[in-house]
Amino acid sequence: MAPTAPQLRTNGRTVCLPMRSPSVTYQHACASAEPLTRFPCERRGGGATGWLSSCACPDFAKPKDLDLKREKFGDIVKAQLQPENCDNNQYFDISALSCVPCGANQRQDARGTSCVCLPGFQMISNNGGPTIICKKCPDNMKGVTEDGWDCISCPSGLTAEGKCHCPTGHILVERDVNGTLLSQATCELCDGNENSFTVANALRDRCIRCEPTFVNTSRSCACSEPNILTGGLCFSSTGSFPLRRISTARYGEVGMSLTSEWFAKYLQSSAAACWVYANLTSCQALGNMCVMNMNSYNSATFDACRLFQFIFENTGGLSTVHSISFWRQNLPWLFYGDQLGLAPQVLSTAFLPTNFSFKGENQNTKLKFVAASYDIRGNFLKWQTLEGGVLQLCPDTETRLNAAYSFGTTYQQNCEIPISKILTDFPTPIFYDVYLEYTVENQHQYILAVPVLNLNLQHNKMFVNQDSNSGKWLLTRRIFLVDAVSGRENDLGSQPRVIRVATQISLSIRLVPNTINGNIYPPLITIAYSDIDIKDDNSQSVKVSFSVTYEMDHGEADIQTDIALGVLGGLAVLASLLKTAGWKRRIGSPMIDLQTVMKFLVYYAGYLANVFFIITVGTGLYWLIFFKAQKSVSVLLPMPVQEERFVTYVGCAFALKALQFLHTLISQITIDIFFIDWERPKGKVLKAVEGEGGVRSATVPVSIWRTYFVANEWNEIQTVRKINSLFQVFIVLFFLEVVGFKNLALMDSSSSLSRSPPSYIAPYSRILRYAVSAALWLAIGIIQIMFFAVFYERFIEDKIRQFVDLCSMSNISVFLLSHKCFGYYIHGRSVHGHADTNMEEMNMNLKRESENLCSQRGLESNTDGQTFQIAISNQMRQHYDKIHETLIRKNGPARLLSSSASTLEQSIKAYHMMNKFLGSFIDHVHKEMDYSIKDKLLLERILGMEFMEPVEKSIFYNDESYSFSSVLYYGNEATLLIFDLLFFCVVDLACQNFILAAFLTYLQQEGQ
């Protein structure tokens, strides 16, 4: 019983692998995972058979061929061998995956996976196993038959393999007609005379009729001068076909031109057979060589395309195929012609007479591309659909590969492929003529030829297809994926020096303008090849891509966008002028100076930001709704290049809105605000006089804590907003990522919020991403604002009104100037005369107020109006500035100010003066600086400006809407909401990541 071979496991030092010898004795080749250390060998089993473990490699099993490549997976070490690494007297055991010695009188066969007998030895046993038995032939019969089983006498000598040799033109005969082996082989001459025209075949075992061109040209099986022998064919030298031909393959990307062995052997013969005999496969082979040369045409050289063009031009008398003038009978259809302006006619004149629809009973979303395929020799292979990745070099699942042909789905596929894999998978090129299959109303099926735009094509040394002007393009028909043949020099069996790979294939589908039935123009395949200089195919790789794009004429949409931008931009100018005029009135300056211009530009930036925002949101929602919801296809999404304009608008909206937000922030921190304390001292107290050693009576000081408390509350409501920032970001992200609204932004026709993992995920449209995220942000923001206004402020907490109530409870009024002559006033004077009291008295005051036992809180008697917009006169402002100047005379941080008693006393004195002045102003004490109270006109409220100037008297406008919140975040919620939205969208457009955009937006909101 044969012993069991040891497992391929290692202790970290030595691995012994079994190798089978002809005598079925296990020996071992060893591989060391670490530097070899000798261990005592332990032998188990009996006789000549056994196995080694935990030992150093013995001398008979040195690993000279084994250690070629190692891959370690945990504790398993795998050693890889190739048949070519075995010696001439060894063969590669495909079971043990190692080299095994051949038996006696044997050597390795041509494949290296078995043994054959040496010359002069016949085979007497071969059961298809690893061993054969050979026996030496007798001296009088030293030759071996072709099958190797018998010895035979050879009168004409032996070949190097020990077989019988025959002269050229003879065939070897070893058996008679009934199969009996002859004692002596004979060499029979094939009859090449006119009655037979036979010649020995390639195997020299039978006579066959010689090639027809030999017979036709020379009436013999020889092609003697002056006839021309090329590609195994014989042609007369008296024909009109050009004898010159260029066998050079041009590789412009690597700056190389080489003599192609394939062109040298078959170019002239294919062209001649096509021209002289109209041989169909030769014409196809000639066309293939033209395609391998990138369909490039040069009138000065007779390369493949020039020869093809010569035949095309000189066969004008032949009929056309399917009435297509570019498709000549017997010839492949390679070109659409070289007339200027022909390409736009081909691509835009006629449309496909079939309808595409995304939904409904007549749903049609399948692009049925088929191709006629040919091998390099011009043989027709088959009709085949392009599904399954026929034109896609990148490997993927069949579902994802076939998604490329789903109408309306923008498709992108990119990968990097090793050159070694390309050489293995594409030893010879396959050529494709691509068609689009469609069905008309009568259910008849037709095919439409798909034109090709080869970016590598040269016409008289010019890359015409790389021109932006489509009128200069030269469209072609046939394509291939990999050419590893034309780059071989001297020997077609050798490694190619250069290969050509289709690294970029793009299928473009264009919608007919103003269609409502989903009609399209003929698709266009744009292909770009890369030339790769082969140096080390195991280390080299190439990046390839395949894409399907959809486009339509967006000229009308762009015009409508420009019109909207112009109209709304004009309105923005008018609004900015009105805003600037109102600002000029509020600062009390009629002069137009640089500050006025700058203010106008800032206001215009804010309004223009709103214009861009409205246009971008409207445009995005238009594409989202009309593309995703349409049944019969009438619109297609803009391509990424066409989205650049839209992205620019979004960027402009964000930049201008950021400027407006910055202006709002600066305005908020530069307002003048003073808290008027109406509290009066209560009685007098005895107070010690410093330095005099006595006491005297003094008024009880009014507590400053009420003022500090109100000021602190004002500081807290500075950033109060109507929406919760964290909730806003979280909910938007939840709907986008968890619910799946982000899937609406995919460039496909599906409106589903989910995608199955095995399916193809189309790339995102930046316009749709913006539309979906903007719509969600706006919707959730508006819902929050409505909830805040309708429910939260009414039933839970209204911080703005609470602040006004706090002022009344604290007996503190707020005098706020946002402009030089304009501001707001919150009347907080207590109706009870004082607020610095105990809890019992305060509760009693509140009870009296609730029972209407005291006067109302309003500035005017018998009114509740506590908030006002104020327009003050210049005289009042001047008096205010005189007092205010003493408060701000010292600049810099408080810790750097002088702390002398005189400075402190001056500040306290100035505070009391301002408090007394503003209190007396409110009480109408200063008749020369009096004010009147009135309501604003409706038009004044709409325009946000005051028609009357406060020349002699200041004007207090009743303000029931608490518009003093306009100097707070609360009153600028729309600006903040749009700014946050644009910030989120700009980050997402830049990085295509909703999570990162949400995180950065929240940080930005917290930083406000």
Image (tube, helix red, strand yellow):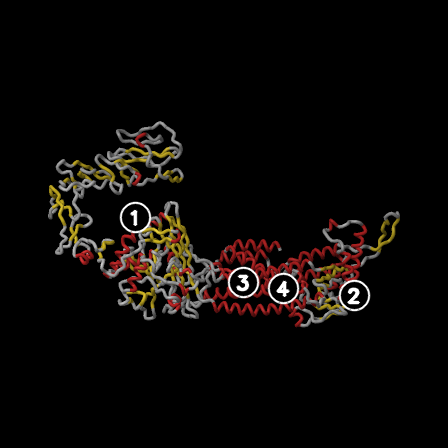
List x then y, in percent, for residue 101. 26, 35
**Foreground disc of the pair 4, 1:** 1
**Foreground disc of the pair 4, 2:** 4
Alpha carbon separation for disc pair 2 and 1? 111 Å
Along the viewing direction, whichever of 800 and 626 lies nearer the viewer: 626
Q: Which residue is mark 4?
A: 601
| Mark 4 vs 1, N-terminal side | 1
Side of 566 where 213 appears, left or right: left
Say if mark 2 contacts mark 3, CB within 8 Å.
no
Q: Which residue is mark 2?
A: 923
- Going by the numbered disc 2, the residue's amino acid type is Asp
Alpha carbon separation for disc pair 1 and 3? 60 Å
Q: Residue at x 37, y 63 (%)?
A: 474
The answer, for residue 114, to whether it is visible in the render is yes
| Mark 1 vs 3, N-terminal side | 1
The C terminus, quarter of image: bottom right
The answer, for residue 790, to whether it is visible in the render is no
- For label 3, the crowd category at 10 Å Cα-Cα, with few meaning under 14, some 14 to 19 and many 20 or more, is some
- Going by the numbered disc 4, the residue's amino acid type is Leu
**Foreground disc of the pair 1, 3:** 1
In the picture, the disc for residue 490 is 1
Q: Residue at x 38, y 40 (%)?
A: 71
Q: Which secondary structure, mark 3? A: helix
The N terminus, quarter of image: top left
- Going by the numbered disc 1, the residue's amino acid type is Asn
| Mark 4 vs 2, N-terminal side | 4
Q: Which residue is mark 3?
A: 649
Alpha carbon separation for disc pair 4 and 1? 75 Å
**Foreground disc of the pair 4, 3:** 4
Position of 155 relative to 804 (above/below)? above
| Mark 2 vs 3, N-terminal side | 3
Alpha carbon separation for disc pair 2 and 3? 53 Å
